[in-house]
């Protein structure tokens, strides 16, 4: 048998796929008895949600953003002594995980641009070289 699916969990728990989804996402609409049953079946089957499927459904791929100022050119960002260490460290942590690494260049004078990046962050951000007054926004 392959990796268990949400349908396998629903079938084994005797509930709908929607109920399993509600339990996984901690959404309203399922009684505590159903939640307990679904959690038990998830543990028994070793079910883990497919992150690629979740990203498609939510239209948002889990990502870590490295935010830097345009004082450096993207063309040589990876070879810059400081930024290459930052990127290498983040990539090491993300290795083997289904998480994207996004590099965001933000002009420190463009507060709206920084706010737009903050609105898109899904898992977290590494503020590589932002001035302290912008980092605390």
Image (cartoon, helix red, strand yellow):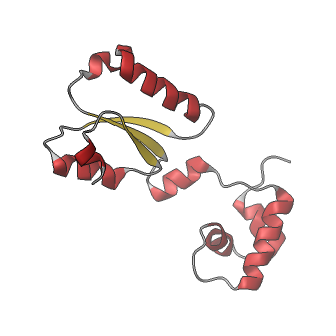
Indicate the position of residue 23 as horizontal and vertical percent values. 66, 72
| Residue at point 35%, 34% (across, down) | 128
Residue placed farthest to the left in the image? 109
Tell me if 1 is positioned left or right of 133 in this view. Answer: right
Indicate the position of residue 70 as horizontal and vertical percent values. 21, 29
Please tell me which residue lies in front, 116 or 80.
Answer: 80
| Residue at point 59%, 31% (across, down) | 95
Quarter placement of the C terminus: bottom left
| Residue at point 73%, 77% (across, down) | 35
Q: Can residue 73 be seen in this view?
A: yes
Q: Quadrant of residue 82?
A: top left
| Residue at point 28%, 17% (across, down) | 75
Q: In this view, does 63 lie above or below 105?
A: below
Q: Quadrant of residue 46?
A: bottom right
Q: Is residue 78 visible?
A: no
Indicate the position of residue 45 as horizontal and vertical percent values. 84, 58
Tell me if 80 is positioned left or right of 93 in this view. Answer: left
Please tell me which residue lies in front, 8 or 116.
Answer: 116
Q: Is residue 25 above or below residue 121?
A: below
Q: How many labels does the image show?
A: 0
């Amino acid at each position: 048998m392959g990796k268990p699916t949400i349908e396998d969990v629903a079938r084994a728990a005797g509930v709908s796929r929607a109920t399993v989804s509600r339990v996984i996402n901690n959404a309203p609409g399922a009684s505590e008895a159903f939640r307990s049953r679904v959690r038990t079946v998830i543990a028994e089957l070793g079910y883990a949600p497919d992150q690629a499927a979740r990203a498609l459904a939510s239209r948002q791929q889990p990502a870590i953003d490295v935010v830097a100022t345009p004082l450096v050119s993207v063309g040589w960002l990876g070879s810059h002594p400081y930024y290459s260490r930052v990127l290498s460290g983040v990539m090491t942590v993300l290795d083997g995980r289904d998480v994207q690494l996004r590099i965001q260049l933000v002009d420190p004078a463009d507060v709206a641009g920084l706010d737009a990046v903050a609105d898109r962050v899904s898992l977290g951000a590494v503020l590589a070289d932002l001035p302290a007054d912008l980092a605390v926004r």
